[in-house]
Image (tube, rainbow, N blue to C red):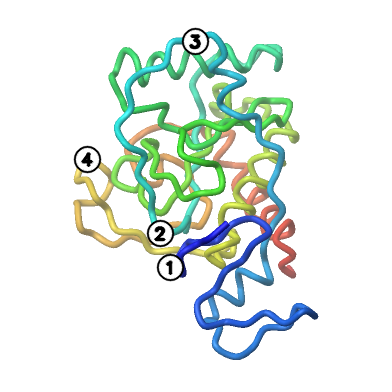
Amino acid sequence: MVLSCVPGALALGALVLCAVTIRPDGAREPGASSTEQAAARHYAARPHIVPRRVWLAGTETYHRDPVRYADRVEAVFLHHTDTPNRYDCADAPRIIRTLYAGQAGAKEWDDIGYNFLVDRCGNVYEGRAGGVDRPVIGAHTQGFNKNTTGIAAIGTFTEGTPVPRAMTEAIASVAAWKLGPAGVDPRGHVRLVSSNSLSRFPAGTEASFSAISGHRDGYETYCPGLALMSQLPWIRDRAAELQGRSR
């Protein structure tokens, strides 16, 4: 496997860095940037991810434009799907197919908008096509889709709704894994530039976000619901722990 030496060209298990030599003992020769060094130190394991072909089985696929990629993933936006909570987890693929049909079919989007979806049992599903290991540009947070990943919790999480721990654990694991290559601390903040004035920020405006934020932080919406918003501090701390960061 050959990877070009550009920002974001990091693959799980094969870290390729410009002008950096990694010795057999794992030590790094001088020349690595602080971001690259942070990524190496805080590289979380990839969680198990159910591939698209599982939930797409036997389903009509819609035309998609060419997949677009960013340089890296600097932030995670959390969503909920605004669907019923009382479902059997074996039925999650059908729910995802319904979401896909609504977004890529009825609304004529190029694909499902979310990069990943998580059910209440903690199963993680590949959403948008393009490769789970790559920084695929989604359609989940208007104005802030570039250099971010969208994770959707399957269900509706308005205030007072119980949020399964298996779900928040899975969200934290995906966030830790995706933020690791860019050296981003899940408890920290990042600066993103809005690409669309329909977001909370005019196009071209630089805004500060928590590395793991809710959809409502970037767009005028109730998503992902107050119950999930209240879980964000725990998710950030857990993601940092999974990256091996000290408290």
Residue pushed farthest right? 25
Looking at the picture, which amino acid does disc 3 mark?
Thr
Q: Secondary structure at mark 1?
A: loop
Name the quadrant of the N terminus.
bottom right
Q: For the residues carrying marks 3 and 4, which lies nearer the camera in this image?
A: 3
| 117 and 238: which is toward the camera | 117
Residue 12 shown left or right of residue 222 in the figure: right
Circle 2 sits on which residue?
71
- Label 4, on which residue? 198
Q: Tell me the kind of residue under disc 4.
A: Leu
Q: Which residue is drawn at the image coordinates 74% and 70% (left, top)?
A: 246
Label 2: how many Cα within 10 Å (few below 14, some 14–19, many 20+): some
Disc 4 from disc 1: Cα separation: 31 Å
The amino acid type found where label 2 is placed reads Asp
Q: Note whether 156 is above or below 136 in the view shown.
A: above
Quadrant of image for the C terminus: bottom right
